[in-house]
Image (tube, grey):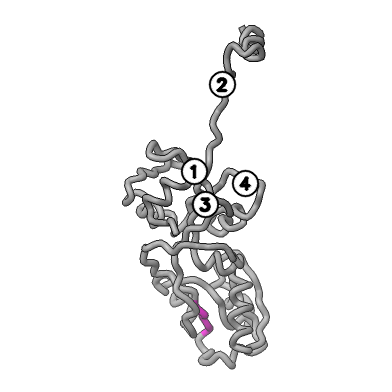
């Protein structure tokens, strides 16, 4: 039977079945996931994920939605290895840290998160941080921030839990971090020395004009 079908296809009697290419839209995991899904479902996309499954295909769109780390989204969209990934949602802090230079659209979602400079209790001014070490998961943002202030510091990059680093060395006097309520810095005896920037949730996409995104962007008001 298989041979007969193959011959028939070669002779022009029938066309072999092919699967259409699936294009993906990225959803950030973690704190942003809930806000992004609520935004999508408010537009009646009905995007829901099964427990422990990171991909879903809503009936209202020809696109797949896949959950990945928010910090990975700019890199994925810039990499030709992931050519079927057309766009995604992530935080403005991540775009700043990654040096994203392409267009981004800020979603109309209020975000309580802020980038901040937190310091140990006996630090009361920026001058006291001169030549000290700053712990942060945002090394590029921290370098730019202190360079603009003309304050020489050392940057110690750490993937997360930067609030714990001042416990481990008296040379680490401050962190550049992100906060929502401020309870975590407070619990770890850090005070807010300066607010650096409010954070937003943003839509970014791969370079190119993709018709597969047209309906999606129109319904969400993401078209320029």
Say which label, 4 or 3, has the lower sequence index: 4
Q: Residues within 10 Å of mark 1 (few under 14, many from 20)?
A: some
Q: Which image quarter: residue 16?
A: top right
Mark 4–mark 3 Cα distance, whole angstroms, equals 11 Å
Pick the quarter of the image with the C terminus: bottom left
In the image: residue 4, left or right of residue 199: right
Q: Secondary structure at mark 4?
A: helix
Q: Position of residue 146 (x, y in %)?
A: 61, 83
Q: Secondary structure at mark 2?
A: loop
Depth order, front residue of 35/1: 1
Question: Which circle, 4 or 1, is nearer the viewer?
Answer: 1
Determine if the magenta segment contains residue 118.
Answer: yes
Q: Alpha carbon of mark 1 to alpha carbon of mark 2: how far? A: 21 Å
Query: Is residue 53 shown left or right of residue 129?
Result: left
Q: State the residue position of label 4.
A: 82
> Which comes before the other along the chain, label 3 or label 1?
3
The x, y position of residue 111, in whole percent, is: 39, 67
User: In the image, which disc is placed on residue 212?
Assistant: 1
User: Dot 3: within a 10 Å radius of its alpha carbon, few (fewer than 14), some, or many (20 or more) residues?
Assistant: many
The part of the image, by quadrant, that contains residue 31 is: bottom left
Residue 128, placed above or below residue 76? below
How far separated are the C-alphas under marks 2 and 4? 24 Å
Give yes or no for residue 70 being in the magenta stretch: no
Mark 3 lies on residue: 87
The residue under label 2 is: 17
Vertical side of 84 occupied by 146: above or below:
below
Specify the segment rendered in magenta. 116-120
Q: Nearer the viewer, mark 2 or mark 4?
A: 2
Check the image and report above or below for 47 versus 170: above
Circle nearer the N terminus (1, 2):
2
Residue 89 is tagged as: none
């Amino acid at each position: 039977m298989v041979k007969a079908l193959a011959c028939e296809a070669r002779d022009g009697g029938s066309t072999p079945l092919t699967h259409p290419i699936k294009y993906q839209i990225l959803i950030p995991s973690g704190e942003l996931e809930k806000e992004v899904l609520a935004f999508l479902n408010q537009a009646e996309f009905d995007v829901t994920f099964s427990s422990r499954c990171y991909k879903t295909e809503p009936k209202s769109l020809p696109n797949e939605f896949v959950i990945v780390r928010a910090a990975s989204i700019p890199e994925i969209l810039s990499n030709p290895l992931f050519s079927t990934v057309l766009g995604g949602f992530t935080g403005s802090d991540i775009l700043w840290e990654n040096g994203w230079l392409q267009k981004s659209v800020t979603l109309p979602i209020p975000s309580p998160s802020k980038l901040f400079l937190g310091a140990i209790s006996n630090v009361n001014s920026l001058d006291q941080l001169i030549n000290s070490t700053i712990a942060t998961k945002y090394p590029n943002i921290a370098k730019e921030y202190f360079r603009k202030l003309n304050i020489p510091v050392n940057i110690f990059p750490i993937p997360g839990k930067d609030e714990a680093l001042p416990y481990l060395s008296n040379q680490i006097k401050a962190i550049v971090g992100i906060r929502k309520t401020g309870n975590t810095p407070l619990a770890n005896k850090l005070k807010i020395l300066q607010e650096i920037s409010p954070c937003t949730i943003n839509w970014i996409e791969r370079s190119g004009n993709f018709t597969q995104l047209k309906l999606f962007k129109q319904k969400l008001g993401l078209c320029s």
